[in-house]
Image (cartoon, rainbow, N blue to C red):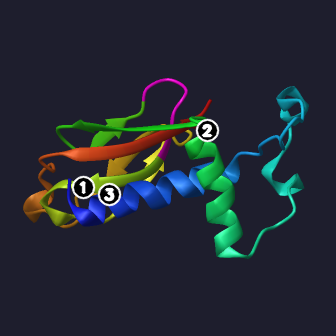
Amino acid sequence: MSYKLLLLLLLGAVALAHCAPMAEEGEDETALEGTAVEDEEPVSDPEAIVSRKWHLWRKGRLHCLSVSSKGNTAACPAGYLVTGCACGYACGSWNPEANGTRCFCHKGCMPNGQSLDWTLAMCCKVK
């Protein structure tokens, strides 16, 4: 796995974990059900964000995997959300689709609009 792809996966995982509210030590996790991300107090300190997300990862609550397929799309398994995408032929233009469960790579960098050789979706979920 290349350095850039690994960095993209890590940044995507941190971004996804930041979007999910988490219970403090000893707090009932069911109390977070239905809590919107907007309800959280914004955290602007990057070290605090990384520390909080590393806590999820270290405790085994953040699970990530990559899924690749031929062509312009790659879908995450049920329960996972896209945290990043990678596109074949060094095409860097992509966006998530299907409520954030699938990557779509644009064909704009391919001659005559032909399909890409592969698409990779980085997928994560908080357990």
Residue for point 61% across, 63% down:
50
| Vertical comparison of 92 with 103: above or below | below
Going by the image, does 87 lie left or right of 75? left
Foreground disc of the pair 1, 2: 2
Q: Which mark is drawn over residue 63?
A: none
Residue for point 17% across, 65% down:
90
Residue 91, image x, y percentages: 22, 64
In-front residue for pair 9/71: 9
Label 3 CA crowd tier, 10 Å (few <14, some 14–19, many 20+) = few
Q: Which mark is drawn over residue 59?
A: 2
* Residue 2 visible in the displayed image: yes
Instruction: Please tell me whether residue 80 belongs to the stretch shown in magenta.
Output: yes
Going by the image, does 22 lie left or right of 104? right
Instruction: Give amino acid for label 1.
Output: Cys
User: Do the CB atoms of the residues marked 2 and 3 lie less than 8 Å apart?
Assistant: no
Q: Quadrant of residue 7?
A: bottom left
* Residue 98 visible in the displayed image: no
| Vertical comparison of 127 with 110: above or below | above
| Vertical comparison of 59 with 114: above or below | above
Provide the secondary structure element on which disc 2 rests: loop
Residue 55, image x, y percentages: 65, 49
Would you name the residue on which mark 3 appears? 6
Residue 12, image x, y percentages: 48, 56
Residue for point 63% across, 44% down:
56
Label 1 CA crowd tier, 10 Å (few <14, some 14–19, many 20+) = many
Foreground disc of the pair 2, 3: 2
Q: Earlier in the sequence, mark 2 or mark 3?
A: 3
Would you name the residue on which mark 1 appears? 87
In-front residue for pair 106/46: 46
User: What segment carries the magenta color?
Assistant: 77-82
Q: CA distance from mark 1 to mark 2?
A: 31 Å
Residue 19, image x, y percentages: 68, 52
